[in-house]
Amino acid sequence: MAASSSTLRLLALALSAATARAACPAATLDFVINEGDAAHEAYAADIAAELTKLGLAVNMRPLDKDAKNAAMVNGDYDLVFSETWGAPYDPHSYVKSWASPDEAHYSALPTAGIDRVAFEAQVDAVLSEMDETERQSKWTALLSEIHYDVLHLPLWGKRIPSLVNNARLSGYVPGAQQYDYPLHKVTVLDADKTVKVAPGAQTGLFASVGRLDPHSYRPNEFFANNWVYEGLIAYGVGGTLEPALATAWTSTVNSDGGETVRFTLRTGVKFHDGADFDCAAVKLNFDHVFAEELTTGDWHGWYGLPEVYKDCSCDGETFVLNTKKAYYPLLQELSYIRPLRMLSPTAFVGGAASDPVTQNSCPTGWDADLSTITCAGTTAIAGTGPWKFESRTASADSTDDDVQDDLVVFAANADYWGTTGDIEKLHVVKYADSAAVKAALEAGTLDAVVGAGVLAPADEEALGAQAGFDLAYGELSQNSVIIMNIADADMRQAVVQAIDSDPIIASELNDAYQPTGRLFPATLPYCDVTLAEVDYDLEKAKRVIDIDLLCPADSKKKGDDGLSGGIVALIVILVVVLALVVAFVGYVVMKEKAGEPLFMEVTTKTPLQEKV
């Protein structure tokens, strides 16, 4: 009986362990998404469905912009959508931003066991490397480490689309930046030289061009500022740096570790208001944008150049820029659409003698948060770009705080220094929704859609297949990813293995999007490195979750030590087998003691002999 009692106790323990495992709640991952973003909701639902196959529950949390930003910085999330910044900001500006308390990587780095200070120092070492070969080596090492740490679930790379009426327009080629729409190079195929366009904007569908000043941010639109204003350098295909208002430049690293760059300026260029473009105008723009208080992280200090900027001067008509330390992305950052494009001196308050401290070109609304600088704004919209601002028609619901435009008209700059087509007027038209854009294209009242987020992906493809339209895509410029704020590296790896982006692209997107297994497209500078991309493998992901990860749910996110489900299952099997063996042996012993041996002696007697 003792053996039987022990057996029962062992069986009870085994069953208890199995029951505990069965009752163990699934880990729940908080998936933060943009409130009201139908596309994100659809992607998140697809991803959540795949993660449930691993036994992981997903709690989708739609948050408004401010709440989402706070959650990302504070680490109040497990998964969140993100996009790399794209050309020309990647990889350097995007990676440098991770140690700043204004986005998701700020919390994801320490969660994954990565020291922010050490990471920032490693990034700075790359950005200060002036030897091209050594710089590539450092980027390769850094990108490999980021990939190995599995901070991201890469989803797809994005190419910027354009759809033009080919009976009206010819020669459009997508630009090298997300909001670079070079319509000034297009040829019109009939007598009507006024072209109607629906551009992709920060808001998706066009809503307004904002203030259209060159030295600030929203509600200004990248595409419109890029049409009106130019910088010293332009960003070209494949990350090439091309002459714009500067035709040539030389760089020297000084004995104090700083850098001096000398720019030869383009001659014969006029601003839209007739003022001359010269070195004095360049210096005036630099002095205003890089006024000391504006170089902090709250203003223009989100990228590297304001941090390293020292001073500037004119040596005749050569513009001379000095930095505090060597910084290789300097030239690339001069190609950014904002905040440093050239404004006519006559459009500054105070004109060419404008004081950067008392009459700064920053918007007047910034004054409340500045202590040493007075923001005076600007007096006109006047750059050197291929398009001049002509007029705007405000929407009925437009207010001073929320400017909305039904129509904005740009005129071709007849004095533009570069190559141009023959469009005379550009009408930027506001539409209620993507369906209205599609209807206008089909009716012939809209000539072109340029940029992402204007048409539904399926409509974009369907129209592109028609003979009357040309659908084109730029090169891969940025990737969509999910940032994972999950401590356990095995859990992060399993999440990546469990998601196949191909079906999501097929059902929700179109050919503008391509599946990817890396953070940055290989087309970007220094990003064409060999990485061991993680293939979709749901079964392997299940094994990782079952063997290496733990219950309760919190341990799956925090990486606590304990017994996994697979180990518990194995223990249950072994205990049950052992219990059966012990029970059987006990039964045999009891039979022997009772004189009833279980195994009788084997004889060779016949049945007849047994009866005798």
Image (cartoon, helix red, strand yellow):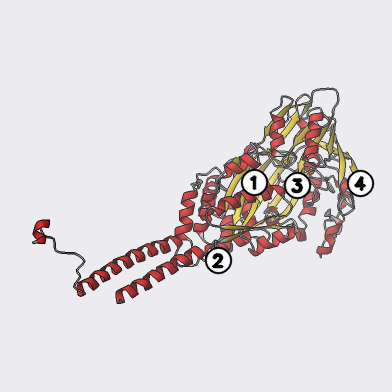
Mark nearest the camera among 1 and 3 is 3
- Counting from the top left corner in percent of width and height, residue 503 is at 59, 42
Q: How busy is the neighbourhood of tag 3: few (under 14 within 10 Å), some, or many (20 plus)? A: some
Drawn side of residue 328 relative to residue 490, left or right: right
Secondary-structure class at tag 3: loop
CA gap, disc 1 and disc 3 = 35 Å
**In this rendering, is residue 17 above or below 121?**
below
Secondary-structure class at tag 4: loop
Mark nearest the camera among 2 and 3 is 2
- Counting from the top left corner in percent of width and height, residue 227 is at 79, 39
Quarter of the figure that contains the C terminus: bottom left
Three-letter amino acid code at the position of disc 3: Gln
- Mark 1 = which residue? 251
Label placed on residue 554: 2
Three-letter amino acid code at the position of disc 1: Ser
**Nearest to the observer: residue 334 or residue 431:** 431
Three-letter amino acid code at the position of disc 4: Ala
Mark nearest the camera among 2 and 1 is 2
Q: Earlier in the sequence, mark 1 or mark 4?
A: 1
Mark nearest the camera among 1 and 4 is 4
